[in-house]
Amino acid sequence: MDRELALEIVRVTEAAGIASAQWFGRGEKNEADDAATTAMRTMFDSVSCRGTVVIGEGEKDQAPMLYIGEEVGSGDGPEVDIAVDPLEGTNIVAGGRANAMAVIAAADRGTLLHAPDMYMEKIVVGPKAAGLIRIDDPIEKTIEITAKMTNKRVRDLTVIIQDRDRHQHLIDRVRAKGARVKLFGDGDVGASIATALPQTGIDLFVGTGGAPEGVISAAAIKALGGDMQARLAPRDDQELQRCREMGIEDTDEPLELRDLVKGDDAIFAATGVSSGELLEGVRFLGGDWTETDSIVMRAKTRTVRFIKAHHHLEHKPHLIMEEE
């Protein structure tokens, strides 16, 4: 992939972030998601690539844009797989809470797992414990390994887990082991990535969340030198058949990072919509000036860029929400 593609993709997440942030705290999650999706799709037309959406807003008959199989980009440049979540955290934005982001992952054509929209078990660590985790290991063993490799006492280790009833047994076991638990609501892409960035203080991610979000997270983890294992968790025969249609015959087989993102290159970009551990949210500064906070990374070079940008909305009328 061309290195310039990374910076072009950030422009796309910035547009989605600005558009959706205007719905922050208004209680309208569908409107926020629609705004992000429309802005992201519009900006993709200017990106120099021949992209195919492999993870998007749904099947063609379920989504008007950014649907699975849709061609995006200018039609020039590299052929790439595109995975998008225009607004990771629709409920977050609607409720005026933290940690919403607009995210995109891109990789060479045929290298991103075409994950169906279902649950996926996941475990993620940063670079120091890479290569040592196993999704089938007891959580207590994983905590011990992670603590040893990060040179921390178990009691100082922080495990981030989504606050859901299905995770209560994990929460109880982590606490019984003596480690710290940090709970989050929605938005497991940001929570996964936090394990590979030392400034967040997060050491281990574990839990069951969306499979599409798992693949998007994997692109970032690959770029950051962390590690991830996963397993699809179909809940019924229909979801099991969906896995087979997408070429996944054995759903019990653990998926390693190289299964989620094949090859040696991937790009991940995200723009904060509301502030969280990873990124600041969109800030409206007055006088049509808006500030965004983004991150973009590339696996091939392990380069990570944090980008603050000021945007003048008078020159971007397509991103302005119409006044009621």
Image (cartoon, rainbow, N blue to C red):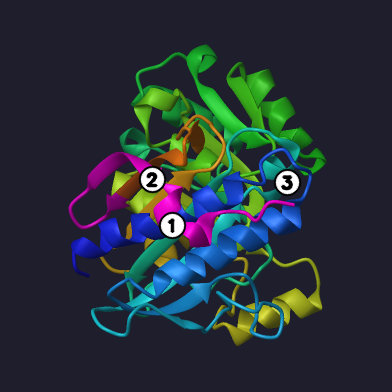
Residue 323 inside the magenta-drawn segment:
yes
Q: Mark yes or no: residue 135 visible.
A: no
Q: Is residue 14 left or right of residue 320?
A: left
- Of labels 1 and 2, earlier in sequence is 2
How many tags in the picture?
Answer: 3
The amino acid pointed to by label 3 is Asn
Q: Secondary structure at mark 1?
A: loop
**Which sits in the foreground, 281 or 70?**
281
User: Which stretch is magenta?
Assistant: 297-324
Residue 313 inside the magenta-drawn segment:
yes
Contact? badges 3 and 2 (CB < 8 Å): no
Local crowd at mark 3 within 10 Å, few (<14), some, or many (≥20)? Answer: many
Contact? badges 1 and 2 (CB < 8 Å): yes
How many angstroms separate mark 1 from mark 2 (CA)?
8 Å
Q: Mark yes or no: residue 291 visible.
A: yes
Q: Quickly name the residue at label 1.
A: 316
- Of labels 3 and 1, earlier in sequence is 3
**Residue 91: which disc?**
3
**Which sits in the foreground, 185 or 11?**
11
Local crowd at mark 1 within 10 Å, few (<14), some, or many (≥20)? Answer: few
Looking at the rendered image, the disc whose residue lies closer to the viewer, 3 or 2, is 2
The amino acid pointed to by label 2 is His
Residue 260 screen position, x and y as percent: 44, 64
